[in-house]
Amino acid sequence: MFCYYCGARLDSTDSCPQCEADVRMMKKIQAVSNYMYNEALVKVNVRDLSGAAEDLKTSLRYNKMNMNARNLLGLIYFEMGESVNAVSEWVISKSLIPDNNPASKYLSTVQNNNTHLETLNQTIKKFNQALLYCQQGNYDLAVIQLKKVLSMNPKLVKANQVLALLYMKDGRYDQAKKCLKNAGRVDANNVKTLTYLKECNEQLKTSGKNKKQEEKETVTYESGNDVIIRPSRFKDNTAVMSVVNLLVGAAIGIAVVCFLVIPGVRQSAKNDANSAVVKANETISTREQDIKSLESQIKSLEGQVEKANTASSSADDKVSAYESLLKAYVAYSDKDYETAGEELDGVKSDYFSDDAKEIYDQVFGEAKDALLGDKYVSAVRDYTNKKYDEAITQLLEIVGTDETYKDGKAAYYLAHCYYQQKDGTNAMKWFKKVSESDVSSRSDKSSADRCISFMESHKDEYGLNDSQGTTDQTGTDNGTDTSGNQTNE
């Protein structure tokens, strides 16, 4: 477990060992998330998938970064036939934790199998079309669509439940019971499945009593390979009654053929034609609906991924900024100002709270001043010891930060370093800055003017051409002696 504030690994105490933040509430939240995940595992082992899904959703409400809970929720959705929800959970899991995440394997398994992916898409389309038929009152077409759905994906629990409801509506409770048992094999403790199954059992129990009553009124026996059913009370008809019954039966048969069979055949032909038209219209209408549905799902998933990436990147930058501030403060406490300045260089203070900004301003300001002071003392020492290259390197860093450092002394010594090395171009540049500066002392300006005049009168010696130098040659004092006097200041 890692600290939410600084990212350090936590121990058994109630505070972070690095930033000393109180992590008791964070540990309690993660413990609740892990507890709900373990409860879900127990329910999965007894195939209570719907109950496990609710526990996993609760776990993710407490800790959205619980990778195992989110991946298991996706597997449960996939087992229940809800492939879209499964893929959504895996995509979110992969975006939050991209490294060493089993969700990558699950997604590649689904996406690389084009045949299986096409089957899942067709299942979703037909199931949505079946729901549309139910809303429109076309229950027969809905039953046909749901049978096709279950032939492609028998584990789709919702399809089994809807088909069972349609069978129950038509009074076919035995077929509804079969659908509910199929759903129960996937999700054993689904509340809807158990409720529908209880209703089916009660209806079948009532119809069973009526069937037994009918059986008492008849007598069944076998004659060879034939099973004969006759009334329990035998009536002996006479020959006349037999003829009458024969004529009545013939008349009834003719009437049945004329009024029932022939219209039924015609109606069947019409139904077949209507069914073909409906299927053609269904193919056209469902394609547009499916395309819009998939486009909206893609946009939603892309938005979720973008939000997750933005939040993760911002959190990483904030943690990195606090780590740099902590390291800089430690170095500052040890008076290692150079390390403190390097740690805070490039760090954005926008990530810090008000208290942290005060520490940042204090450490960075004092580290900067101390670092420049050390470099200035070292540069003056090198200049005194005639180590002009080393002095130039340090003085350039100082004037690069502040040209007026020490009332222009850094620029003054830099000019004299170039002067001693006969680098007339750079010496002239920095002597002019000292001469024109508002912060340089009068003695420094006077010395700079004398050196400029001397270099202008000895251009060949200092590598100057006629276009360089604008000061009148009024001074002939040796600049070297002047700089030597200034080193004692």
Image (spheres, rainbow, N blue to C red):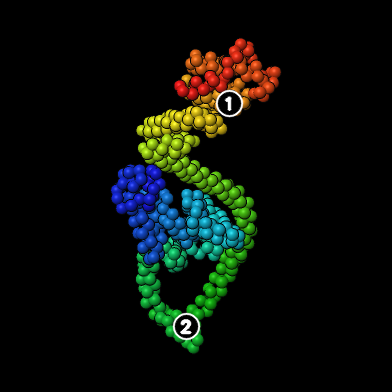
* Snapshot quadrant of residue 192: bottom left
Q: Nearer the viewer, residue 379 or 188?
A: 379
Nearest to N terminus: mark 2 or mark 1? 2
Q: Position of residue 152 (x, y in %)?
A: 55, 63
Where residue 109 appears, as percent x and y from the top left, is 55, 60
Marks 2 and 1 sit apart, C-alpha to C-alpha, by 131 Å
The residue tagged with tag 2: helix, strand or loop? strand
User: Is 218 situated left or right of 90 in this image?
Assistant: left
Position in image of residue 290 (x %, y %) = 58, 50
Q: Amino acid at mark 2?
A: Val
Q: Residue at x 64, y 55 (%)?
A: 280
Residue 214's place in the image compared with 78, above or below, is: below
Of 66 and 175, the residue lying toward us: 66
Amino acid, disc 1 = Gln
Residue 87 in percent (x, y) is at: 51, 54
Depth check, front residue: 436 or 90: 436
Label drawn at residue 149? none
Q: Residues within 10 Å of mark 1 (few under 14, many from 20)?
A: some
Q: Residue at x 41, y 49 (%)?
A: 64
Quarter of the image for the C terminus: give it. top left
Quickly name the residue at label 2.
227
Name the mark on residue 420. 1
Residue farthest bottom in this picture: 224
434, 386: nearer the viewer: 386
Q: On screen, 450 above or below 9?
A: above
Total labels drawn: 2
The image quadrant of residue 331 is top left
